[in-house]
Image (spheres, rainbow, N blue to C red):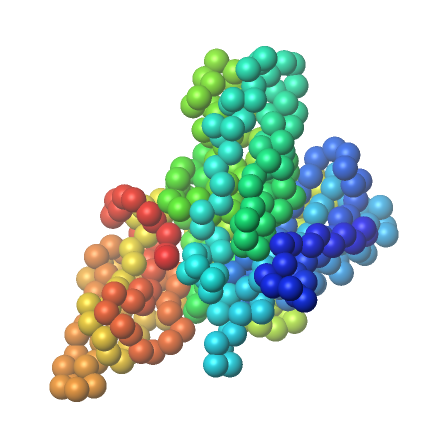
Amino acid sequence: MQTEYIDLIAPAPGQTCRLQVLRFGAVGAGRKAYIQAALHADEVPAMLTALHLKTLLQELETQGQLFGEIVLVPYANPLGLSQHIHGQHHGRFNLSDGINFNRGFPELSQAVVQQLTSGLGKDVVGTIRAALQAAADALPALTSAQDLKRRLLQLAIDADIVIDLHCDSDAVVHLYGLTPQASQLNQLSAQLGARAVLLATESGDSPFDEACSRPWLDMQRLMPEANIPLACFSTTVELRGEADVSHALAHQDAQALIGFLQTQGFVAGTAPEKKALCEPTPLSGSEPIAAPSAGVIVFHRQSGEAVQAGDAIADIVDPDTGAITTLRCASGGVLYARCSTRWAHAGKRLAKIAGTSLARTGKLLSP
């Protein structure tokens, strides 16, 4: 294992912020897998899983069982790790500007096309990866948050596989990824025991995983004559809820990630045979259940339960009048995530259901 530290733009004089980067296997040669944890810095299950994965990768490297290079960033947001207000950790949004740390990643497709004026040559994938790397290296960064996004893209943009480990508030394991990569997502879903796999070609707001994979889709569209493959598989993995933190779960998830890397040829041996627990569904069919008014939240359904259209999901209880508003789902599917608090402001997302009957448009992810 090689350990590297990357210093970010200092938030203020006297302060230092840096990323830890762990490299396993054949560093700088052959295929590359990139895994990072807790881009939303308060996603603790992801960090613990990354530490268990580190231990497994060290053992496999010592045994000569790794092929290619595996890069692990065990805490992908040191800026967010330091954000506390009145004793509460706030890692999802940058407190300096209110921007979600996993939104607004630079889209590199146009910059790459402009670089490829002399053609792609024989090594199409290698040429595009070099252009993507050059585009990532050229990104401007005036703030610590911009620098963080630039550095993470620099680490991941040339990888064959990118896995971004997160967690939700109160949830079962679920995945996000590109529609054309449903087959690989199914393999990862089976290993992790995911209960929902949500597909889109563009989810909106440019999250990290799509910033790595969608350039290949864009270039297929922009250069149809070049027969460009989808050379980067990228996904966001939600490892249950914020409170689902234990060594047993983290070790289980780390072993599942090793199993997936075995299916992709990065780790020797045969992955355990596991059957996927769900079929992928379109992210546009995911139904958010939102509160129409403020009040106390009383859930009727648990994360992981299957629901039918019309089922009661939650009540909003007005503490002033005692009036109860029952919220029902419009589509059937799996309730894959709920909020972890029990007080709602008007418009608060309370739950999400992986369905197939809806067809939302625009920005499909939570804020």
Residue in the foreground of this view, choosing between 114 and 328? 114
What's the residue at 76%, 60% (across, down)? Answer: 55
What's the residue at 52%, 61% (across, down)? Answer: 40
Please state if 168 lies on the left or on the right of 290 as rendered.
right
Residue in the foreground of this view, choosing between 277 and 184? 184
The quarter in which the C terminus is drawn is bottom left
Quarter where residue 336 is shown: bottom left
Please state if 34 lies on the left or on the right of 344 as rendered.
right
Residue 165 appears in the rendering: no
Residue in the foreground of this view, choosing between 114 and 308? 114
Give the x, y percent position of residue 201. 40, 37
Give the x, y percent position of residue 203. 38, 44
**From the viewer's perspective, is residue 54 above or below residue 107?**
below
Please state if 31 lies on the left or on the right of 149 as rendered.
right
Residue in the foreground of this view, choosing between 18 and 306? 18
**From the viewer's perspective, is residue 69 above or below residue 287?**
above
What's the residue at 47%, 23% (across, down)? Answer: 220
